[in-house]
Image (tube, coloured by chain):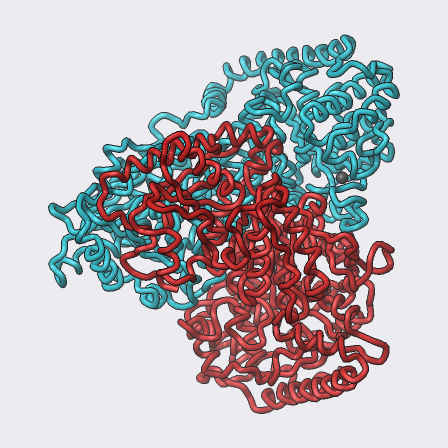
Chain colours: A red, B cyan
Amino acid sequence: MGYTDVDKLAINTIRLLAVDATFKSNSGHPGAPMGMAPVAHVLFNKIMNYNPKNSKWINRDRFVLSNGHGCMLQYALLHLCGYKLSMDDLKAFRTLDSVTPGHPEAHDTDGIEVTTGPLGQGFSNAVGLAIAQHHASAEFNRPGFELFNHYTYTFLGDGCMMEGVASEAASLAGHLQLGNLIAIYDDNHISIDGDTNCAFTEDVVKRFEAYGWHTEIVEDGDHDLEAMEAAIKKCQAVKDKPSLIKLRTTIGFGSKMQGTGGVHGSPLKADDIKQVKIKFGFDPEKTFVVPQEVYDLYHKRGAEGAAKEQEWEQLLAKYSQTYKAEAADLKRRLTGDLPEGWEKNLPTYSPSDAAVATRKLSETVLTKIHQAIPELVGGSADLTSSNLTRWKDAVDFQPPSLGIGDWSGRYIRYGVREHAMGAIMNGLAAYGTVIPYGGTFLNFVSYAAGAVRLSALSHVRVIWVATHDSIGLGEDGPTHQPIETLAHFRALPNCMVWRPADGNETSAAYYVALTAKHTPSIIALSRQNLPHLENSTIGKAIKGGYVVSEAEKADITLVSTGSEVGICVDAAKYLKEKHNLTARVVSIPCFEVFDTQSKEYRLSVLPDGIPSLSVEVMSTMGWERYTHEQFGLNRFGASGAYKDVYKKFEFTPEGITKRAIATIDFYKGVPNLRSPINRAFQQLI
Amino acid sequence: MGYTDVDKLAINTIRLLAVDATFKSNSGHPGAPMGMAPVAHVLFNKIMNYNPKNSKWINRDRFVLSNGHGCMLQYALLHLCGYKLSMDDLKAFRTLDSVTPGHPEAHDTDGIEVTTGPLGQGFSNAVGLAIAQHHASAEFNRPGFELFNHYTYTFLGDGCMMEGVASEAASLAGHLQLGNLIAIYDDNHISIDGDTNCAFTEDVVKRFEAYGWHTEIVEDGDHDLEAMEAAIKKCQAVKDKPSLIKLRTTIGFGSKMQGTGGVHGSPLKADDIKQVKIKFGFDPEKTFVVPQEVYDLYHKRGAEGAAKEQEWEQLLAKYSQTYKAEAADLKRRLTGDLPEGWEKNLPTYSPSDAAVATRKLSETVLTKIHQAIPELVGGSADLTSSNLTRWKDAVDFQPPSLGIGDWSGRYIRYGVREHAMGAIMNGLAAYGTVIPYGGTFLNFVSYAAGAVRLSALSHVRVIWVATHDSIGLGEDGPTHQPIETLAHFRALPNCMVWRPADGNETSAAYYVALTAKHTPSIIALSRQNLPHLENSTIGKAIKGGYVVSEAEKADITLVSTGSEVGICVDAAKYLKEKHNLTARVVSIPCFEVFDTQSKEYRLSVLPDGIPSLSVEVMSTMGWERYTHEQFGLNRFGASGAYKDVYKKFEFTPEGITKRAIATIDFYKGVPNLRSPINRAFQQLI
Ligand SMILES: [Ca+2]
Ligand SMILES: [Ca+2]
C-alpha cells in the first residue's frame, strides 16, 4: 500500500493520454479509461507481475480488457510499462495500419493477450486463460517447482455483464472453482443508452454468488486505491472460487460530462479537455504528456517483473534437470509445434473397410492421437455421446473436490454453452500450453458465431468438432439441420471449414487443423455412416480438394463434400450405365485450403472444357466459385429418417443424374468452356 | 385442487404416448415428457385457458415448450385437448411431412406458439410473448374491458438454463417486471452428458432472484399435483415480477432407467416399455392407448376454454361499440395487414437532396411511419444513438414504477443482449399485435444467429435495423467490421437481407420488410453519408434489383449494393472519361427479392452479352450467382478513418476501374457470353 502523489499523477496521466488520443483521432471511448484508470494503476503497479521486455513469459499475470472499447487505457498502460508501444503509436490511435487499432487486437500489438471489443468475449477468454493455467499447473508444477502460479485479471463493464456469452462463462467458471481468476466489474451505471436503470437493474453481485463466485465491493473506485488493492488481495487469497470485484466508478472522471453517457463513445470537447487538464494540474496547452516520474514508476515496476521472470527462468532451469521430459514437453508446446511423428498415429482406411459415420471416424482420430499430442484438450457443449469427442479413458477437467475429475483432466464438460465454449477455447488457445477442440452440432456452432469470428481474426488454433452436419441428421428436423452454416463460415476469412467424406479425409482434416498454428477449423461430420472412397488418401485430402475418380473424355465433373461424395460416386456409375455418360468425381473437403493450391493443381482438379456440377445438401452459396452449376438445398430441411429426407430432396444417384444431364445439355453449345478457377483478377488478401 | 385417479391415469397416458411414439419412430426424447407429464397435466387441466377449436384466440394463455426436444409431451397434450392433431399424427411422429416433427414448428402444427428446440430460444420467445401482452393490455384494455389478461407459461430444462440467450432474456424480464410470465424449470439433474453436477452446479433460484424474479420450489414434481397447482397460483398472484418455479422431477419417470441420462434422447427398450405399462396399469400389448375418461377430462377442459372464448368475444363485441377505433385497430392487426395508405408516409428523395447515411434515412422512415403503423414496436441492443432506431418523442416500454416509461411504450431498451433481442422479437411477432424491429451493428446480428434462423424457419415478420454495415464504419476496426455477415444471412432461407444505397432504396426496404408477413428482414445500413442515386425509386427498388444507370452498347455491368453503388456510378464516369469504356450500373439491394422476379426482368437487369463485375466491400461469396467477376473483401478490414480504409482496399473509382478493365479483357474472346441468370436447372424451393 502507501500511495503518494505520484500515483495520483500517474492515474491522471493515463486519463489524459486517453483524452488526447481520442481527441486527436476524433474517435474512440475516453469514458472507460478515465473511470478505470485508478484500478488499472493499482493492478499494474502493485499487483500484476509481467515483463514488458518479454510479453510472452508464460507465467506472467494475464490481463484482459473485456470492455475493449476502452483500449486507450490498455495502450496507455502498455506504453508506460515499456512494451513495444511508443508515444507515436499512441498518437496514431485508430489510424490506418497502426498498432493501436480501435479495439485491442492480440496479433497486432505487443502485450495484448486476446482480441476484444465484441462485448462479453474478453471476460470469457479470461475464463479460458484461467482454465489453461489450472491445467498447466496440474500438468507441470511439482513440489518446490511452482512453474505456474499467476493470476488472470479481467476488466468488464455493464455491456459485457449483459451479454449471454459472459453469463455462460461465469457459470462455468463458478462450477470449475477457478481460484486464479479475478474479474473487476466497472459499475459506472452508464451504458450507451444512458443510465443502466433503463435496461439493467439486476443484482450482479448476487448473480455471481449464485454462480459460486467470491465477491467484493469497492464503493469508491475513483479514489480509494487502498480499498482496491485490499479487495484484489482478498480475492487472491480465495483459492477455490473465481472472484468478482464490483467497483463503483465515475465514467469519464474529471470531464464536465462525467457520470453521463456523453463521455462514453465520443472524444471530449476542447474546452472540456482544457478544464480537466487544469483540474489535474497539467498544462492545458500540452498534449500527450507523461511526467518523467510516471515513466520512472512504471519502468521500476517493469524491472521488478523482469527480475521475477529471471527468477522464474532459473527455477525452470533447475526443473529441467529434475523433470527433463516435462520441461522438454513444456518448451516444445510453447513453440506451437507438435511432437515429432505424431501424425503416424492418424488412422488410414481402404475402400474395403466398413462404412462409418465421420463423427465416429473423428472419435477414432482423437483416440489414436491423444497420447501423442498431450496438449490436446477436448470437450463438448453437453453432446459428448453425440459428438463422440471423448476418448474412452479421458479424465475430466474438474475441481478435485467434486470427485469426478481433476485439474489435469483433458476433457472439459462445457455444459450447453456453445458461445462460451467458443470464447473459452480462444482463451485456451491464446494461453500457449494447450490446443483446444470442442464439440457441438454444426447447426449450433452458429450460437458461437461471435467467438468463432474472433478465433479467425486473432489467429488462434481452435478446432470445432461439428457433428450432425446436414439434413442427414434426420429426425431432429429443420431446427437442427444446418443449411446456411457452411456458407457462413466459409465466408469468414482465416477459418478452415472441413467436411470430410470418409476416414482418410477425416484424418486429413485433423492433420491440417492441428498443424495450422494460426487458423481455427470447423470440422463438419456426419451422423450417418459413409463408405470409404476408392481414391482418398491423407496426402490428397490435405490439398483441400482432389480427384476421387478420374475419367477420360468426361462429360461432366461432379464436385462434392462429405456425405454426398459417395452418392456422387454412385451417380457416376448410374450415369454410365443408364445414359452412357462419363462423370469425373471430385471431393473438396476444404475450400480455404484448396484455394491455397497452385492454379495448375486446381485446374487439374477442375479442368477447362468439362461442365461441372456441385452436390452438397445445403445452401449452394459459394459453390459458384468452383462449379458451373450447383445442386443444393436453398430451403429448410425436414424431420424424418435420413434416407427419406435425402430422397425427398432428390439427393440420390437418380436426382444427381437428372441435374447432371441438364448441366451437360446446358453447356453443350459452349465452345472452350472455362473452369470457374479462371478469374479475371486476383482477390485482395 | 382435488385430484383423482383419472388425473393419474391422464398423466400416465401422456407418458405412454411419448413412450410409444418415440419407440415407433425409433427416435426422440421420452425422458422429459415422462418427467414433466404431471405439471403439464396440472397446467392444461386446472390452470390454462385455451380453445382447441380456435388456437388463434388472442387472449388464450400461451404455452411454450422451451425444451422442445420433449415435444411428444406437447403433441400428446394437443391431441388430448382436441387440437388438429390426430392419433395418426402422433403415430407419424418424426416421419417425413408429418405435423409432428422432431421439434415443435409453429407454422406446421396447430396449437404450437413458437418454434423451439434450439435451447434457450423458447424461454426467450416467452419473454417476448409476455412483453407483447403487457403492451397489448396497455394499448387496448379499458376500465371494465380486460381484453388482455392471460398468462404466458414456459417449460424449460437444464439446457435452456445454461444457454446465454436465456440468461439475457431472464435479466430483461426481471427488469421489465413481467408479472404475467411463469416459467417452470424441470430440475431433473440430468443433461446429455449425465448428472448436471458435471457442468451446472450454480444456484438457479438465487440467480433468478438476482434478476428480480419471484421464485417457488416444488420438491416432488413427480407426484405432488396440489403443490404444483398451489405454486402456479402463487405465481399468478405476483403481479410485478416474472416467476420461476423450480420443480424437482425424475427424468423418464417409470422407466427402469428413470433418473439417468439413458432416458433422455433415446426410446425405451421393449422390455422397459412392458414393465412401465404394467406399472401404470396399462395393457403391455397395446400401444397408443387413450382411455375414454382421459379424453373426456381434456375435452371438458377444452369446452370450458371455448366457453371462455365465447364470453371474451361478447366482451369484445361490447368493447367495439364503445371503443370503435381501438377495436377496429385490434381486429386489423390480427389480420397482419397494415393500415391502408400507410405507405404514403414513406419518404422519397431526388439526387439533389443532400447525401445522408442510410442509418439516418432509416430513422427518417421510422419517424414518418410510426404514427401510421401503431403496431410497430422498436428497440435497440443498447445502441440507440448509433442505430438511430428511436423516433424523437417515443415512449419507452418500461414498468411504470421506474418512472421512465410505461407499458404502452413502443420503444424497448433491450440492453446489450442481441441474442435475447432476436428471440424476444420472435415472441413479439408470434403474439399477433405488434411488428417488432430492433437495432444493433450488422456485425453483432451474428450474436443472434440462433434466433434469426428461427425467425426465418418459423415465418415471422421481424426486422433487424443493422447499422455500421461494413468497413465504412471506420475506426472501430476489424472487430466490428462485418465481412461474412451478409453472405451468412443471404444463405439463410426465407430471410431478406437488404442493403439500400440511398433514400428511396431505404424506403423500399422498409416497404417490403413491413409487408412481408411471413419473412424476417435484415436491413444493413451505412454509418457514412451516401448520395441519392439518379434513377432510384421505391417502385424499382422493391424489385430487389434494378438498373441505376443504363447505357447502349455497354462494355460492362457494374453491380453493387449500399454504399458502393455511388462509387460504381463514379467509376462508370471514370471509365468513360479515362478509358472510353461504357459501364452500366445495377443495384441489387436484396438478393432474396430479386430472385423472385421473372427471368425476363432479371435478364433485363443483368443481360446476356455483357460481362459483369460485382462491387461490395465484404465477402464476395454469393455474388457469383449474379455476376461474372467479383470485387470484394475476403479478408478482415482495418481500423482507420473510413475513407482511408476504403482507399487501402481500393474501393474507389480507380480501384473499380482497374478490375472492370480486367473483367472486360478477360471476357473479350468469349462468344455469346451468358448472364449468370441463366441456369441449367431450377433449385428446389
Ligand atoms: Ca457501464
Ligand atoms: Ca435436465
- Visible in this render: residue A79? yes
Rendered residue at 45%/53% (across/down): A546
Give the answer, above or below, for where B294 lies relative to B544. Answer: above
Give the answer, above or below, for where B277 lies relative to B180. Answer: above
The percent coordinates of residue B107 (x first, y second) are: 53, 26
Give the answer, above or below, for where A365 lies relative to B231. Answer: below
Left of A323 or right of it: where is B643? left
Left of B589 or right of it: where is B310? right
**Quarter that holds the C terminus of chain B:** top left
**Residue B117 position by quadrant:** top right
In the image shown, does B202 or B256 lie closer to the viewer?
Answer: B256
Quadrant for ligand 1 reads bottom right
Left of B346 or right of it: where is B554? left
Rendered residue at 20%/55% (across/down): B664
In the image shown, does B387 or A98 lie closer to the viewer?
Answer: A98
The percent coordinates of residue A11 (x first, y second) are: 61, 79
**Residue A679 position by quadrant:** bottom left
**Quarter that holds the N terminus of chain B:** top right
The percent coordinates of residue B37 (x first, y second) are: 77, 26
The percent coordinates of residue A641 (x first, y second) are: 60, 29
- Visible in this render: residue A187? no
Rendered residue at 44%/55% (across/down): B482
